[in-house]
Image: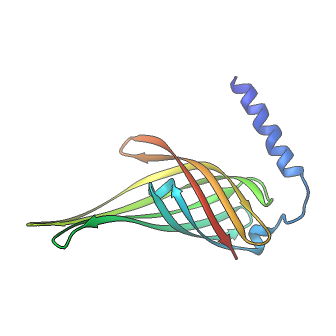
Amino acid sequence: MAKKIAVISVVVLLAVSLTGTAGAQSRMNLKNDVGIELLGKGLVYTFTYQYMIANPLGIEVGFGMLGGGSVDDNATIMFIPVGGKFYLVPKNGSIFLAGGVTILSASIDSGPFSDSASSSYGYAGLGFEYRSDGGFLFRGAAYGLIAEGGFFIWPGLQIGYAF
């Protein structure tokens, strides 16, 4: 079974890399992109910015926040993912590898309790991106979120605009 999956993966990768050359440089022509990722590295949502520093490599930073409360009580959690993506195919549609760290900052102000804490977890993922010549961007990925010796698989879907 593993051999079949490996052979199918190689065939798909070769087919994608050999299809047409139109728009093959859209990642380098449109080096910046912004978007919103649902689920993913920030667990619920993340606003992201990515810059392509070289043809196969982009660096990324994001921001997400959850919070709630009343006049007297509130709690807030901030998610700040920082990492990069390595693209395996130099086309508009490409498989990518992602990795980095998400920094967490939490605070609570409830009655006599006032506290804040920070933590982080790593992530590694495999995904697919489509970046059109007009700027439309779509990414889908499966991330392994890694913290304190354990991990779990978490999906992420992103739409955005490249410029």
x and y percentages locating residue 80 in the rendered image: 43, 65
x and y percentages locating residue 10 in the rendered image: 79, 38
Q: On the rendered structure, is 70 left or right of 11?
A: left
Q: Quadrant location of residue 66?
A: bottom left
Q: Look at the image and tell me in which quarter the C terminus lies.
A: bottom right
x and y percentages locating residue 34 in the rendered image: 60, 71
The residue at the far top in this view is 1
Q: Nearer the viewer, residue 151 or 43?
A: 43
Residue at screen point 35% across, 45% down? 148
Residue at screen point 89% across, 64% down? 22
- Above or below 88: residue 62: below
- Above or below 95: residue 47: below
Residue at screen point 80% across, 41% down? 12
Residue at screen point 79% across, 44% down? 13
Q: On the rendered structure, is 96 left or right of 99?
A: right
Q: Quadrant location of residue 152?
A: top left
